[in-house]
Image: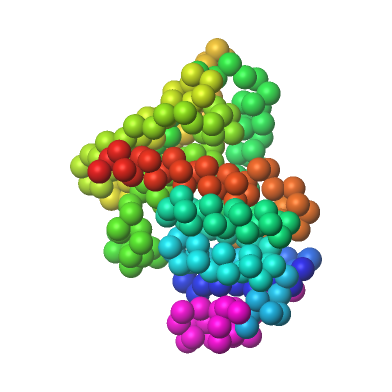
Amino acid sequence: MRFGLLGTGYWAREVHAAALAAHPKVEFVGVWGRDPAKAAALGRRVFATPEDLFAEVDAVAIALPPEVQAGLALRAARAGKHLLLDKPLALTNEAAEAIVTEVEARGLRSLIFFTSRFQPSTNEILDHAMATGGWLGGRALYFGAIGADSPYAESLWRKEYGGLWDLGPHALSLLLPVLGPVAEVSAVSGPRQTTYVTLQHENGAVSTMGLTLNAPPEAGRIEVELHGDAGWLAVPGFDGDAVASFGRAISQLLSGQTQGLDVHFGREVVAILALAAKQAR
């Protein structure tokens, strides 16, 4: 499949471009970016406009801030291109719905790269949890600490929207498959741009999320646990090999076996986060 890449930031360079170049069933055609110099540095054909790139490929991988991604994903879908997207899908329900509508209308494949969901050990635990059943709730703690030495230190959208929108999708990608759809959302804001979210799932289970990108370095922690009739079950943390995980995501898009992590799931995640953001305000 002929792939194009939209984006030239750290994640695009270190993960998307590397995985696309290495995948044996992908022709990595070229890149478009808002900074032509950074695009040229990737060593691939550089396209002047997204539409120029769309004309040469079958699918696009997007590594851009969500408000930029949403518009470009919609344009790519209208051009008939399969979508390999970053999380979150968008920042509004309206933008997410527009992408879903276009993907459905054109019969396109779509996949959203929730990083941990493409790690075998994580999926083994989730499959075990779903087969076991009897889960009463869960807890996700994502206390990130983005300091000056972080590759994301200058990420303006992360500074504005914080851990709720950056880390919340990761937490939901682990909680929702086991505990099911969400019926009610409540949220409050805490110190250091922390958002505390409580989710009432349709089956009666309750889960919580604590999310921030501004934790003190000594307080940085990522933990995800489920509890129920079988006791407590810890979901393993990410192993750090994002390139391998993205390679698996590419393979799943090619095969059409997407674990349900398509734009429909992305729309569900956006709806929960948008409501939590409103409640926290």
Which residue is most to the left?
191
Location of residue 62 in the rendering, given as x and y in whole percent from the top left corner: 56, 66
Quadrant position of the N terminus in the picture: bottom right
In the foreground, 220 or 273: 273
Location of residue 95 in the rendering, given as x and y in whole percent from the top left corner: 48, 57
Provide the residue span drawn in magenta.
27-51
In the foreground, 48 or 170: 48
Q: Is residue 50 magenta?
A: yes
Location of residue 99 in the rendering, given as x and y in whole percent from the top left corner: 57, 57
Query: Quick check: 136 left or right of 255?
Result: left
Q: Residue at x 60, y 53 (%)?
A: 100
Query: Quick check: 22 left or right of 224?
Result: right
Q: What colour scheme does the image use? A: rainbow
In the foreground, 58 or 190: 58
- Relative to 231, residue 253 above or below: below
Quadrant position of the C terminus in the picture: top left
Query: Quick check: 190 left or right of 129?
Result: left
Q: Is residue 53 magenta?
A: no
- Relative to 130, residue 193 above or below: below
- Relative to 19, residue 237 above or below: above
Q: Residue at x 31, y 35 (%)?
A: 187
- The quarter of the displayed image where residue 260 is located: top right
- Relative to 42, residue 134 above or below: above
Residue 60 seen by the camera: no
Residue 215 seen by the camera: yes
Which residue is most to the top?
229
Location of residue 221 in the rendering, given as x and y in whole percent from the top left corner: 37, 41
Q: Residue at x 58, y 44 (%)?
A: 265
Q: Residue at x 55, y 48 (%)?
A: 266
